[in-house]
Amino acid sequence: MNEPKTGTIWEQLSTTKLVRYLLLFALGWAIVQVMAYFETVLVIFIFAAILAFLLNYPVGWLARVIPRSLAVIVVFLLSLLIVGGLVATLGLAIISQAQQLLKQAPESLNAAIALIDHLQNLLTQWNFNVDFSELEQQLRSQVLTGIGVGFTTLQNLLTNLIDLILIAVVAFFMLLDGERLWNFVLRPVPKDFRHDFTIIIQQNFLGFFWGRLLLSIFFGISAFLVFVLLGIPYALALAAIAGVFDLIPGIGATLGISLISIIVLPQGVLTSLKILVSCIVLQQVEENLLMPRIMQGSINMNPVVMFFALLVGARIAGLVGVFLSIPIAGVLISLFDVDEMRGEGN
């Protein structure tokens, strides 16, 4: 009877395997460093590719009746007109309301601290000795930091027009001649697998971004209508916050709802609770009724894997990594056919 092999993991690893793992680690580290060095360039081309992916749907539909180059020009000009009109109307209104909200942030902070003090006094009456002074200091620090980040973000939106123009120009040329460029990217991929690889990219990237965009638009518009019905001031800016946070998969809508509830806290605890409950209902409608239909055929991923990908993406590439981590993880799961990392549907 043969005895089972024993030994530590170091004894079972050969020198070749160790060298291979070290090389893979070094390659990953080098890729992260290169991405960090060329961050601005990568951001421009990544968002241009996303924009080209999204516009490729109407271009492909219009190219059935007219030449593709003409279809690209028509769709691109119409998109510029629509975006320009939205920026000139809704965009400026949102920025104006957002500036007023940031100026009222100290009032929200004082309301939150007063609520914490009231809770502490209530616990003291019940013979629970709790000191929330450290929490109050952390809250003040975080709010002041958030105000600075908010003003910086608004300034960047107004000043980074050159990057936005570059993104639009690159996306335009990607639409015009993107097929040849994509064929060049596919050269390292075996010929028999190129079609399947293209389908996987379309399902995970195109399906994800298009689906998240539609869901975020629904959530933002629905939240705006709810805020107007409840008589909440700055409804447009608050709805924009809800829609933007909803772009982040998994936890984005929850973060947006929590932030909005804190912002409206000076208007009363009851008003904040009404907004919280209303947004939670909208979130459930989105996730249980709309998402299965809109995201059908797109990414199917275990929630644990999704959050792991989000954290890794945020650590490597910040906000850009958050948006790209889910589709990249979906591509890897599809390529290697890892059923254990898929959702319960498969």
Image (spheres, rainbow, N blue to C red):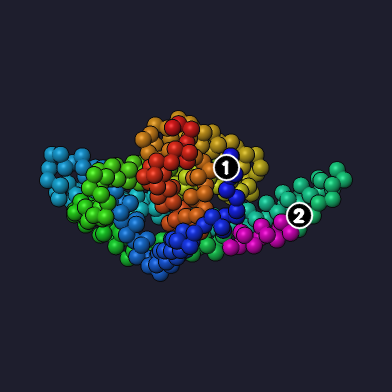
Is 27 positioned to the left or the right of 196 in the image?
Answer: right
Q: Secondary structure at mark 1?
A: loop
Question: Relative to residue 51, is residue 215 depicted above or below?
Answer: above
For the stretch drawn in magenta, the main secondary structure is helix
Q: Amino acid at mark 1?
A: Asn
Is 177 positioned to the left or the right of 317 in the image?
Answer: left
Mark 1, Cα crowd under 10 Å, few <14 / some 14-19 / many 20+, is: few
The image's mark for residue 132 is 2
Mark 2, Cα crowd under 10 Å, few <14 / some 14-19 / many 20+, is: some
Is 75 positioned to the left or the right of 288 in the image?
Answer: left
Q: Nearer the viewer, mark 2 or mark 1?
A: 1
Magenta span includes 143? yes
The image's mark for residue 113 is none
- In the picture as drawn, the residue positioned furthest to the right comes out as 127
The residue sitting at 56% across, 58% down in the picture is 10
* Coordinates of residue 256 in the picture (x, y in percent): 53, 47
Question: Of label 2 and label 1, which has the lower sequence position?
Answer: 1
The residue sitting at 81% across, 46% down in the picture is 123
- Tell me if residue 8 can be seen: yes
* Coordinates of residue 66 in the picture (x, y in percent): 12, 43
Q: Quadrant of the C terminus?
A: top left
- Tell me if residue 290 can be seen: no
The residue sitting at 44% across, 56% down in the picture is 321
Q: Which region shows up in magenta?
A: 134-145
The residue sitting at 53% across, 43% down in the picture is 304
Q: Secondary structure at mark 2?
A: loop
Q: Quadrant of the N terminus?
A: top right
Q: Which residue is mark 1?
A: 2
Magenta span includes 53? no
* Coordinates of residue 114 in the picture (x, y in percent): 72, 52
